Image (cartoon, grey):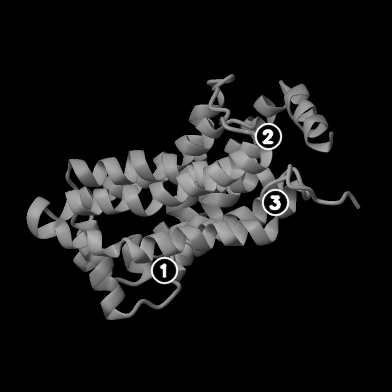
Amino acid sequence: MTELTTQNYPNVAQSFGITGIVILGMIFLAPVLALEKLIGKEASMLLYYLLAIGLPFFLVYTIRKRKTSKHSFNIAIENKLIIPWVVVGTIALLFGIVSPLGNLIPMPESIKKAFMDFGSQTGVFAFLMMVVAAPILEELIFRGIILDGLLKNYSPQKSILISALLFGLVHLNPWQFVTGLIIGIFSGWVYYRTRSLSYSIIIHASANLSAYLTHFFVDDSTAMDETLVQMYGGLTNLILAIVGSIIIVLVSTYFLQKEFNKAPLKVAAAHEEESS
């Protein structure tokens, strides 16, 4: 087994450490939310997010740069045909697989209130946080740094699973953990096959945009008290949604695989670079 070196950052322990840094940033910068009285709830939330995630990212990026001398991220989109399939696959995963699974976990009233409060934020600042800032900053950390480093140390399967697990854990609740884990696995697979962070950002942005837009069409206060069957308008609709989503995910994965196989030399070259 090849001995790990500081050139292959991070390993598993360091990845957990990075996640811990992000969580500490979220905890210690929480007082920024008190600015709500001065600049409004959504603006204070955006500012808090940029600081709570942005500062840990800068710290981890600095450590990575010092350990590996790597100071950039690959954001090239070399195959635009990948984009529609990752968007369709993400939406199918979210509404037909992630949502039903997350709904199976009981939610206390206090948590329901917190989710409804967050869901009521539908302004420009909320959009910037959910659809722009979160996809960029979180993908830079969890795919651009953590997964990229893990792929240099471990098998693709282990690397993708660990990065997705940590991505789920950083959300600090079981409902978003499910979303983070499943979307993280999909995003991690796409990153592994393309080595481009742009596709992962698009996946994340598609998921968050879907959630953001849902608040305009669904009454959160009612939806939170509905059963899974009621949410989908009946058992038949639920079954159709799940089966249809699985089919769409499989079709998207099939066509993504075809697009990935058009340029196999890129991943092969990346493996050679990692092992050197």
Q: Point out which mark residue 193 bears.
A: 2
Q: Point out which mark residue 103 bears.
A: 1
Identity of the amino acid at label 1?
A: Asn
- Left or right: 80, with 266 as reference point: left
**CB atoms of marks 3 and 2 within 8 Å:** no
- Mark 1 vs mark 2, foreground winner is 2
- Left or right: 91, with 264 as reference point: left
- Mark 3 vs mark 1, foreground winner is 3
User: Residue 29: where, in percent of width, then height?
Assistant: 32, 61
**What is the secondary structure assignment of the residue under circle 3?**
helix
Q: Mark 3 points at which residue?
A: 159
Disc 1: CA contacts within 10 A as few (<14), some (14-19) or many (>=20): some
Q: Distance between the residues labelled 3 and 1?
A: 28 Å
Mark earlier in primary sequence (3, 2): 3
Mark earlier in primary sequence (1, 2): 1
Q: Can residue 247 be seen in this view?
A: no
Disc 3: CA contacts within 10 A as few (<14), some (14-19) or many (>=20): many
**CB atoms of marks 1 and 2 within 8 Å:** no
Instruction: Give the residue displayed 22% in from the left and 60% down from the top.
Output: 33
Instruction: Give the residue displayed 30% in from the left and 45% down from the top.
Output: 129
Identity of the amino acid at label 3?
A: Ser
Disc 2: CA contacts within 10 A as few (<14), some (14-19) or many (>=20): many
